[in-house]
Structure formats: C-alpha cells, structure tokens
Amino acid sequence: MIRLYHIHKTYGRHEALQDVTLRIAKGEFAYLTGPSGAGKSTLLKLLYGAEKPTTGKLLVGGVDASKLPPRKLPFLRRNIGVVFQDFKLIPSRRVSDNVGLGLEVLGTPRAEIDRRVRAVLNVVGLRGKEDRYPLDLSGGEQQRVAVARAIVNDPAILLADEPTGNLDGAMAVEVMEILLSVNLRGTTVLVATHDVGLMDRFPHRRIRMVEGRVAEDR
C-alpha cells in the first residue's frame, strides 16, 4: 500500500529525511515515532503530496507520488485521509459542513453528502451534533470531527500526525480507539506519535525515526 525506496528530503542544507526505505502493507496499523525533529511530519507530508522527495521513489496505493504532477494530486488525495494535531476545522462552519467539505469539493450530490456525514458522525460518536460549531465542542470532540472529515470518503489510507497531542489522557484514548476501529474496516492507518503510553496500551508495529533515519522497526 505504501512503499518508500531510499527517500531523501532536504531543505537547503538540512536533510530532514535520509535514505528512508519502508513498506506499509494494505490494512496495516503502524506507529511512526521518535523525538521532535526526527522527520515524522515530513514523511507524512510526502505521503499526502504536500511535499515531494528530493530523491528516491515513493509509491502510495500503486501511484508513484514522487513524480506526480500537481494537477493530479487531487486524485491521489481522494484515497488518503489526514488528521492533524491542531484539528484544522473551520470555526464558522457547522460540524456537518466541516465533515462534508471534501465531498463538496468533489462534486458529490447533496443527498449523498448528508447520508455519508450522518453515518460517519455516528461512527465517531457525534450523532446529534451536526449543527454545532467547532468552538462549542471539547478538544476531544473537535478531534473526532477531524477524524470524521478524514474518513467520510472511505479512504484506503489514513494518516494521523500527532492526533492526540493536544488531548488529555481519556480523550486521547477515545481518539485512538476510533482510529483502531477505522483500521478494522480495512483502512491502512499510519499514526505519528511520541506518546509511549498509548503505544503500550494499543500495541502495533513501531517505526522509530531519529535524525531523519529509520532507527528501529518492530
């Protein structure tokens, strides 16, 4: 599902990723861990097309993302959901609008958007809060809205960049349980985190990065 071959990513003189070779299988759940500045976020940005590798080959769902022209990025991103630490919700739009935004961009019929939004809000435990606004919700609820937005299009791959970083212990557990339930439906899930407690509680493959390199994979 995800394959990286000798990936390097440089910003000026700084080498954010150094000779990274990885394979994430279809339907797998894996953690991307390591200290701040290890390259976790940079690697995720390459996977959803926000950045391109300096050198190396990157296959995402069979597509060579390292050579994909900008005009074709939307086709890649249709199969990828992304969850960010800071939620990135639009405060002036209702929960249902935030969740369905990507479907609107794709030109999905209104009735289909409404059906999918209702279904996915039920999955993340926010049924009945369709008309609320993000700032009326708790941090954990906002992150659940962000997860719903990422999975409403039933992506093959879900990327989460420190999804529990701004949440307390109980809320972090709730969000992780949702990500695991998404994985059980067949979605490939890659979570960047430094939360050892959560990784111990929900054990899965750990890919540990240090200074832009894969230091451990178990």
Image: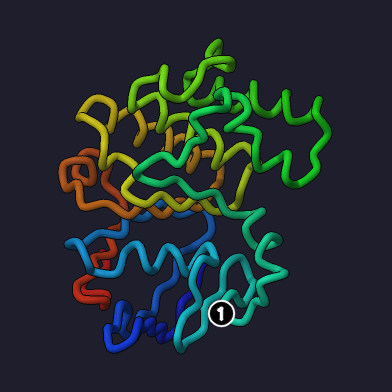
Q: Position of residue 135 (x, y in %)?
A: 41, 23
Mark 1 surroundings within 10 Å by alpha-carbon count, few (fewer than 14), some (14 through 19), many (20 or more) = many
Q: Which residue is mark 1?
A: 66
Check disc 1 and report its element: helix, strand or loop.
helix
207 lies above or below 151: below
Please give left or right for residue 104 compared with residue 206 in the image. Answer: right
Please give left or right for residue 57 compared with residue 143 in the image. Answer: right
The amino acid on which the numbered mark 1 sits, given as a three-letter code, is Ser
Q: Residue at x 39, y 68 (%)?
A: 43
The quarter holding residue 190 reads: bottom left
- Picture colour scheme: rainbow
Which of these two is toward me, 108 or 172? 108
14 lies above or below 85: below
35 lies above or below 101: below
- Quarter of the image with the N terminus is bottom right
Please give left or right for residue 46 compared with residue 128 in the image. Answer: left
52 lies above or below 2: below
The quarter holding residue 20 reads: bottom left
Which of these two is toward me, 31 or 45? 45
- Quarter of the image with the C terminus is bottom left
Q: Residue at x 60, y 52 (%)?
A: 156
Q: Position of residue 103 (x, y in %)?
A: 71, 40
